[in-house]
Image (cartoon, rainbow, N blue to C red):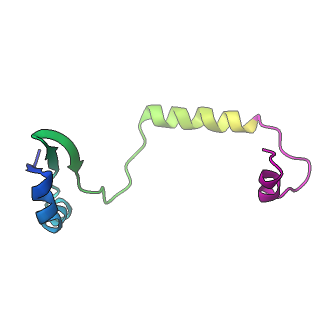
């Protein structure tokens, strides 16, 4: 874990905190009234692999979509919404 700063300290040092997260990968905890309230973390630079559970969920979702009935003809979704249809 990285540093912890009060909200007022982070306001004064936000640029530094963000640069440190980006360049050093350091996490910063922001406190309010002495209690942890938020966290600044570095962004992942590369996409992560999906977990087995996420892959299984996506497969179930894709299978469920294949059972949906497709419209017989083209339609304009904006027009249908305007008519109050879904």
Tell me where residue 64 appears, x and y as whole percent.
Answer: 68, 33
Tell me where residue 34 appears, x and y as whole percent.
Answer: 9, 40
Which portion, as a residue range, is magenta? 67-86
- Measured along the vertical axis of the image, is residue 45 above or below residue 71? below
Q: Is residue 20 visible?
A: no
Tell me where residue 76 appears, x and y as whole percent.
Answer: 82, 58
The residue positioned 76% from the left and 34% from the top of the image is 67
Is residue 60 shown in magenta?
no
- Measured along the vertical axis of the image, is residue 43 above or below residue 85? below
Nearest the camera: 45 or 42?
A: 42
The residue positioned 52% from the left and 32% from the top of the image is 56
Q: Is residue 86 visible?
A: yes
Say which quadrant the C terminus sits in: top right
**Is 37 positioned to the left or the right of 6 in the image?**
right
The residue positioned 14% from the left and 45% from the top of the image is 31
Q: How many marks?
A: 0
């Amino acid at each position: 874990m990285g540093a912890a700063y009060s909200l007022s300290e982070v306001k004064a040092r936000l640029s530094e905190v963000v640069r440190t997260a980006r360049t050093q990968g350091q996490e910063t905890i922001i406190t309010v009234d002495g209690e942890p309230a938020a966290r600044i973390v570095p962004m992942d630079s590369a996409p992560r692999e999906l977990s087995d559970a996420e892959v299984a969920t996506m497969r179930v979702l894709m299978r469920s979509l294949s059972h949906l009935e497709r419209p017989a003809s083209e339609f304009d979704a904006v027009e249908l919404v305007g008519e109050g249809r879904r």
